[in-house]
C-alpha cells in the first residue's frame, strides 16, 4: 500500500515509542517488521527523498525490497532512486534480510524485485546481531552522495525481536556536521527548503553595501579588514533572518536578501519585513564599528529596497555551497537603487512602499499619504547606470 505524507504511528506497542522518538529527533529512519515489511518512515526521511520539496511516497506494508517498494523508490527525487543504487543498498543489508526470512534464499527470491533476484545467492550468511552499520549511496540534486545506515533490533516486551529500525545519516562524521550546523538558524534552513524548487515568487528585495570600502581595505591590516567583513556579514544575516527573510549572495562587503510574500503571509508583510531588516542592519553599524576599533563614520552602508512581482526564486546547491538565487529585472533595478543611496541612505521604491498596508506602515512610522517620491534620474546621487537602466523608478527615503 503506497502512502504519502506524515504516516500514522505503528499499531505495535513495541514500535510506536521508537517511531515517536525517531520522528521527534528529526532522524532519517525507516522501521520494518520481522518480515521486513515497511511499517513506518519519519517525515524527515520522506522529505529528503522527496527532494526537500514534498514528502515522498512509500510502500507501507510491502517488503522493503519487494516490487512495490523498489518501484516507489524509483519515483523519488533523491536517495537510492535508481536500480543501480537500490542494488547497492540490497547488497549492503541483504544479509540481515536473509537472516530474518523464513525459508531462506528460496523464499527471498520470491519476495524481492526482479532486478534484485540475481543478488540473493551471493549474499553472505550472517548471524543476527543487535545492531550493524553499512554504507550506501543515494542521489541529491542529481549527484551521487554517500550515506550510512545503522540497523538496530527492536525487542518486544518478552525480549523477542519485533522489528528493525534503519537509521540513516550523511556519510560526513558528526563532528563535521556539527561544525556546519553550529551557529546556523534553523528558521533560515526551513525557508531555504521552501525554495528548493525554483518558481515565480513575488518578493521584496534588499541590497546593502559598504560605502568607500576600498580605501578602508587599503588602510586597515588585512586581518582587521577580514574581521570587519565577517562581523558585517554576520550582522546582516542576523537582521535578515530575524525579519523573516532569505539571505542571498554576499558579494564583497554587500548582502542581497529576499522577503517572500508566500512565507511572510502577504505582500504587505514582506515589504514590512524588508524595511525592518534594513533599519536593523543600519542600527547595528555602531556596534560593528566599536568592536572593530573604528570610528562610526567609517562604516556607511547604502541600502536599496525594491519589489519584484515576477521574480524567479530558487536554490542552487553544489558540492561546495547552497545559495538562494533570484532572477528578474527587479534584481538589477534594486542594485541601481542601492548604488544611488550614497551617504548611508536607505532608498525604497514606490513599488515596495505602496504594498504596505495601513498597519504595517503605521508600525514603520510611515504616512503613505505624505511620502514624496523622486525618480532615480533626478537624484543628485544618481549613477550613470541608474540613469541608463532605471531612470523612471521612483524612490523615497525610509
Image: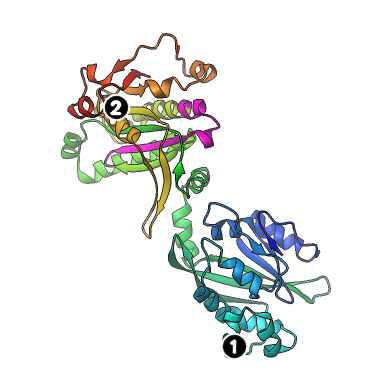
Tell me where residue 150 appears, x and y as whole percent: 59, 71
Q: What residue is shown at x 28% (from left), y 38% (from top)? A: 253
**In the image, which disc is placed on residue 296?**
none
Residue for point 23% across, 20% down: 377
* Residue drawn at x 53%, y 36% as measured from the top left: 262
The one of 272 and 3 positioned closer to us in this rendering: 3
Q: Which residue is mark 1?
A: 123
Cα–Cα span, label 1 and label 2: 65 Å
Q: Residue at x 29, y 24 (%)?
A: 344
Q: Is residue 379 visible?
A: no
Which quadrant holds residue 246? top left
Task: Work out whether 109 lies above or below 220.
Answer: below
State the quadrant of the C terminus.
top left
Provide the residue span drawn in magenta: 252-272
Q: Quadrant of residue 1?
A: bottom right
Identify the residue at the far right of this view.
158
Question: For mark 2, does the 10 Å Cα neighbourhood hold few (<14), some (14 to 19), or many (20 or more) residues?
Answer: many
- Marking on residue 337: 2
For label 1, the crowd category at 10 Å Cα-Cα, with few meaning under 14, some 14 to 19 and many 20 or more, is some
Percent position of residue 239, x then y? 43, 34
Amino acid at each position: 500500500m503506497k502512502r504519502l505524507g506524515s504516516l500514522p504511528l505503528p499499531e505495535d506497542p513495541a514500535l510506536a515509542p521508537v517511531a515517536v522518538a525517531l520522528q521527534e529527533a528529526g532522524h532519517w529512519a525507516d522501521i520494518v517488521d520481522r518480515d521486513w515489511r515497511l511499517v513506518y518512515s519519519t517525515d524527515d526521511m520522506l522529505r529528503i527523498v522527496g527532494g526537500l520539496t514534498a514528502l515522498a511516497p512509500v510502500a507501507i506494508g510491502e517488503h522493503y525490497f519487494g516490487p512495490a517498494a523498489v518501484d516507489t523508490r524509483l519515483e523519488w527525487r533523491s536517495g537510492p532512486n535508481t536500480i543501480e543504487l537500490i542494488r547497492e543498498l540490497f547488497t549492503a543489508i541483504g544479509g540481515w534480510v536473509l537472516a530474518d526470512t523464513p525459508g531462506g534464499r528460496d523464499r527471498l527470491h520470491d519476495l524481492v524485485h526482479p532486478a534484485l533476484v540475481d543478488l540473493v545467492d551471493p549474499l553472505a550468511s550472517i548471524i543476527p546481531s543487535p545492531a550493524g552499520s553499512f554504507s550506501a549511496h543515494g542521489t541529491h540534486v542529481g549527484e551521487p552522495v554517500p550515506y550510512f545506515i545503522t540497523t538496530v533490533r527492536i525487542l518486544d516486551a518478552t525480549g523477542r525481536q519485533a522489528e528493525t529500525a534503519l537509521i540513516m545519516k550523511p556519510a560526513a562524521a558528526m563532528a563535521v556536521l556539527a561544525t556546519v550546523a553550529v551557529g546556523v538558524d534553523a528558521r533560515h534552513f526551513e525557508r531555504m527548503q521552501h525554495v528548493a524548487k525554483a518558481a515565480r515568487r513575488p518578493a521584496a528585495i534588499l541590497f546593502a553595501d559598504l560605502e568607500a570600502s576600498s580605501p578602508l581595505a587599503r588602510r586597515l591590516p588585512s586581518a582587521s579588514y577580514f574581521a570587519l567583513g565577517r562581523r558585517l556579514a554576520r550582522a546582516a544575516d542576523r537582521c535578515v533572518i530575524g525579519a523573516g527573510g532569505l539571505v542571498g549572495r554576499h558579494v564583497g562587503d554587500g548582502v542581497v536578501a529576499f522577503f517572500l510574500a508566500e512565507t511572510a503571509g502577504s505582500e504587505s508583510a514582506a515589504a514590512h519585513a524588508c524595511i525592518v531588516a534594513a533599519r536593523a542592519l543600519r542600527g547595528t553599524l555602531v556596534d560593528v564599528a566599536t568592536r572593530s576599533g573604528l570610528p562610526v563614520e567609517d562604516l556607511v552602508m547604502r541600502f536599496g529596497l525594491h519589489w519584484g512581482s515576477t521574480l524567479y526564486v530558487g536554490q542552487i546547491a553544489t558540492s561546495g555551497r547552497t545559495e538562494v538565487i533570484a532572477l528578474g529585472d527587479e534584481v538589477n533595478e534594486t542594485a541601481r537603487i542601492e548604488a544611488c543611496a550614497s551617504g548611508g541612505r536607505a532608498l525604497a521604491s514606490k513599488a515596495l512602499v505602496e504594498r504596505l498596508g495601513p498597519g504595517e506602515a503605521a508600525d514603520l512610522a510611515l504616512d503613505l499619504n505624505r511620502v514624496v517620491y523622486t525618480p532615480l534620474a533626478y537624484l543628485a546621487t544618481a549613477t550613470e547606470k541608474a540613469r541608463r537602466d532605471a531612470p523612471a523608478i521612483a524612490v523615497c527615503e525610509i
